[in-house]
Image (cartoon, rainbow, N blue to C red):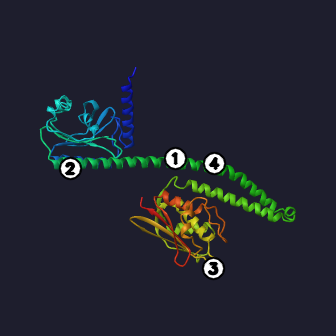
Amino acid sequence: MTSAAGRLASTDDISRDLELLEYGLNPSPHSPLLPNETVLKAIQNLVGLAAELCGTPFGVVNIVSAAHQHQVGAWGVDPGVCSRQDSMCSKVFLTGEKTIVADASRDSRFADNPFVAGDLGRVRFYASVPLETATGFIPGSLCVFSETAQELTPAQEGMLEVLAKQVVELLELQRRTVQLDRAYAELEESNARLAGFAGRVSHDLRSPLTTMLGYLEMLQDDPDITAVPGAAEDLEKISGSGRRMLAMLEDVLSFSRVGGGIQREYVSLRTAATEAAWDLGINDPSLVDIEDATIHADRGQLRTLLQNLLSNALNYRSPQRPLRIRVSGVSNYHGSTVFVADNGKGIAPEDRAKVLEPLVRLHRDGDGAGTGLGLATCSSIAKAHGGELTLTETPGGGTTVAVSFPAA
C-alpha cells in the first residue's frame, strides 16, 4: 500500500513535469529537453558569460524534472542527463536562495555526492542560483563550478543572479512560444471544422434552394401563371429572397474558408484587380483606376478580397457624384499594402470597427444588397496573412480600405 507521503510526492512529481511541458521543456531523458534552437543558443551564451565572469571553467543551466537533471547550455562540459538523486542542484534549488560553496568536499550536503566524491566528477567550488519564475515555479538553476576551491566577490555573486534572471526571461519566451503554437494549432483545427461544417450545410441547403429557384423560373415563364393578377410580382419577391439566401450561403462558405490554407506567391495587383472587376461585370475602364504592384499573398484570397471591396464600392456609391474607384499598392522589405479607395457614401468613424464584424450592416437609405460578410471576410483574409485591415476617409468623401500583407 502506498503511504500518504508517497502519494503526495508522486502528485508533486507529476505536477513538476507538467509544468516543465508548459515551458516547452521535455522531462523525458530520451528526447531533446529544449527543441527551440534559438533559445538554446541564447542560454548557451549566458552560461558562457556566467562562467567567464565568475572565473570558473564550467557552467550549466540545470533543469530538474521529477526523476532527472538535464544539463542545457553547458559551458566547458558536454551537456548530459543524470538522475535527480545524483544531482547537486536538486538538493538546494527549491530553497529559492543562491548556494555558494568554496569546497563542496567539506560541505555535509555534497561531500558524498558522486559529482564531488569522484564517481562522476571532483567538484570543489560550486555556486548555483535558482531559476524562479514570476509564478514561483523553479524549473532548475544556473550553476558554475570548478575542480579547485575558490570564492566569489559580491560583484560576481550579483552578476550571477542577474544572468539567472535573464535565463528565466528566455524560458518565459519559450513558454509564450509554446502557448502561441498551441493556440495556432487549435485555431487551425477549429477553422478546419468550421469549413467542413459550412461546406456540408451549404451543400445541403444549396441543392434544394437551387431546385426551388429553377422551378420559380419555370413559373415566371408560364403565361398562364403570370396572367393571374399579382402573381408575377409575388414570384419575383420569392425569387429575390431565394437569390439573397443563396448569396448568403456562398458568403458564409467563403468566410469560413479564409485562412484554411495560405499559399503565398508574388501576384500582380493589376491582374488580380482586373480579374475581380471582370467577375463583377465592371467593364468600364473609367470606373476603376488600377495601379500595379507586386503583392506577396495567396492569389485566390487576394482576388476574393478585391471582389468584396469593389462590390462594396458599387453597393455604397454616393448619389451625388459618379462612382470612381482607385486600386493601388506599395511594397518594401516590410511587406505589401493594398489600398482600395472610393468616393462613395463613406463610413462614419464610430461605425468603422462595427462593420468589420460578421453579419453587420448599417441599413442606410439607398444602400445596395449585401450580407454583412464582405468586410468581415476581407479582415479575416488580412489576419490570415498576419496583417490587418483599416478603414479611413477618402479625401473629398468616400472610404479608403488599407490591407497590409507583412513579409512572411
Residue positioned 46% across, 49% down in the render: 184
* Mark with earlier residue (4, 3): 4
> Which residue type carries mark 3?
Gln
Compute the Cα span from label 3 to label 2.
Answer: 71 Å
Check disc 2 and report the residue beneath it: 159
Q: Residue at x 17, y 50 (%)?
A: 155
In the rendered structure, the answer to whether residue 297 lies left or right of residue 124 reads: right
Is residue 304 in view? no
Amino acid type at mark 4? Arg
Q: Is residue 14 above or below residue 184?
A: above
Question: At numbered mark 1, what does the secondary structure look like: helix, strand or loop?
Answer: helix
Residue at x 16%, y 48% (from the top left corner): 154
Spatial CA span between label 3 and label 1 = 47 Å
Residue 381: x and y, percent? Answer: 52, 59
Mark 2 vs 1, N-terminal side? 2
The residue that mark 1 highlights is 189
Please identify, in this view, whether the residue under mark 4 or under mark 3 is nearer the observer. Answer: 3
Mark 4 lies on residue: 200
Look at the numbered discs 2 and 4 and tell me whether their residues touch, using CB distance below 8 Å. Answer: no
Marks 1 and 4 close (CB-CB < 8 Å)? no
Amino acid on which the number 2 mark rests in the picture: Met
Q: Which mark is residue 320?
A: 3
Q: CA distance from mark 2 to mark 4?
A: 62 Å
